[in-house]
Amino acid sequence: MTGDDTRGGGRADGPLPYVLVALAFTTGMIDAVSFLDLGQIFVAAMTGNVIILGLGLGLAGHGTPLPSALSLMSFAAGAAGGGRTILSWPGHRHRGLLLAAGTAVQTVLVCGASILASRYGFADPRTRWPVIMMLAFSLGWEYAVVRGIRVSDLNTTVVTTTLTSLFAESVVPARQGRRLVSICALLAGALVSGTLRRLLFPAAPLWTAVLILTGCTLIAYVAARRPGAEHWR
């Protein structure tokens, strides 16, 4: 996975693969927080939320389906917003700048959720609902933007498709390596999230995600402005 890796169209991706791996890592961190502290729901893995919602609706005593439904709707709203941003993005603008702009929005949303969680905790529903909404919206937004910049074989939120492609398709080792790295990044993010939560405080993984997202925003912006960036536009 180097800056000289090319996409299907034969163009290089520059540093974008590295940024996407970092985004996948933060996704693992945030989804771990949502499962442990926000009512055993997900804000990125929407397949799991659909199952949880179905169980909540079909099994009495399994818990309220509201958190998973709220997460699904917020993720969909974020994906719709990110999709509209991509459609309105000028064709001549660098996709590195698109990623920087998208990640900046996500950083603000995750930072807002971190402030609420740090100040009021996760137990109060008046805090939990807006935290779920902001995190799920931010990840729906992220996934739409990531799809829009079209870096092949690197997924930041959906592991099922990546895992299937890893074992079902016979492709060059470099592409398989990208898929494996994205899966490992999600796993590592969840592992680090649990460790930070145990050693520091429950909202620590969210604040760590804010720092990483800020770094991703700056890296994507600076890289897109550097000489030679037109080769991976």
Image: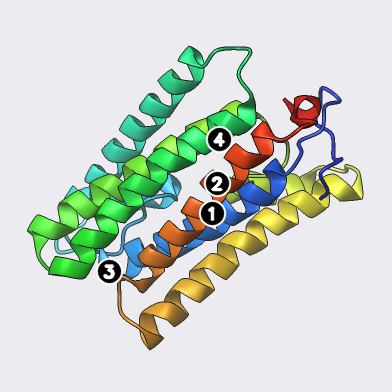
Q: Callout 3: helix, strand or loop?
A: helix
Please tell me which residue is depicted at 44% across the width and 22% down the height of the picture: 85
Q: Secondary structure at mark 4?
A: helix
120 over 182 or under it: above or below = below
Q: Amino acid at mark 3?
A: Asp
Report if the CB atoms under discs 3 and 1 are less than 8 Å apart. no
Neighbour class for label 2 at 10 Å: few (<14), some, many (≥20)? some
Q: Residue type at mark 2?
A: Leu
Please, what secondary structure does the residue beneath circle 1 have? helix
Answer yes or no: do the residues labelled 1 and 2 have beta carbons within 8 Å? yes
Which is more N-terminal, label 2 or label 3? 3
Q: Residue tagged by mark 2?
A: 218
Left or right: residue 132 versus residue 177 is left
Mark 1 and mark 4 lie on one chain; the one further toward the N terminus is 4
> Disc 2 or 4, which lies upstream in sequence?
4
How far apart marks 1 and 4 lie (CA) works out to: 12 Å
Q: Nearer the viewer, residue 11 or 170?
A: 11
